[in-house]
Image (spheres, helix red, strand yellow):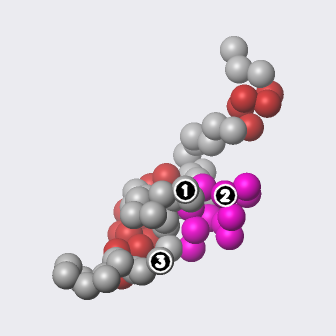
């Protein structure tokens, strides 16, 4: 069994991960980039900020499209 301190560092549930401005209070930034990794985008249901109570497939698609719009076209410079 995990101690409360260990459980706080692990966030896996159907309500999803958290968007944040920094790694201390969230998992990904507003562009779905995983904190601590330059080119790691999280584009699945784990970033849905709450359980919508219905099939979230359109929400996941829209969030994924937003994340992918931040990726520069092939052959151009990578931001940051």
The quarter of the picture where the N terminus appears is top right
The mark closer to the camera, 2 or 3, is 3
Disc 2 to disc 3: CB gap under 8 Å: no
Q: Secondary structure at mark 3?
A: loop
Image point (42%, 80%), residue name: 79
Q: Which residues are magenta?
A: 19-30
Tag on residue 74?
none
* Res 13 → quadrant: top right
Q: Secondary structure at mark 1?
A: loop
Q: Main secondary structure of the magenta part?
A: loop
Residues at marks 3 and 1, CA–CA distance in whole angstroms: 13 Å
- Mark toward the start of the polypeptide (2 vs 1): 2
Q: Which residue position is annotated with label 2?
A: 23
- Which label number is shown at residue 36? 1
**SS type, badge 2:** loop
Front disc: 2 or 1: 1
Mark 3: few, some, or many residues within 10 Å (few <14, many ≥20)?
Answer: few
| Residue at image coords 38%, 69% | 64
Q: Nearer the viewer, residue 29 or 63?
A: 29
Observer-nearest of 59 and 79: 79
3 or 1: tag closer to the N-terminus: 1
Q: Earlier in the sequence, mark 2 or mark 3?
A: 2
> What residue did someone put label 3 on?
80
């Amino acid at each position: 069994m995990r101690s409360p301190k260990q459980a706080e560092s692990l966030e896996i549930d159907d309500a999803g991960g958290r968007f944040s401005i920094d790694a201390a209070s969230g998992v990904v930034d507003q562009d779905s980039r995983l904190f601590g990794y330059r080119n790691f985008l999280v584009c699945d249901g784990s970033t849905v900020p709450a359980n919508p109570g219905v099939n979230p497939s359109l929400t996941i698609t829209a969030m994924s499209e937003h994340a992918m719009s931040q990726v520069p076209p092939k052959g151009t410079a990578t931001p940051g």
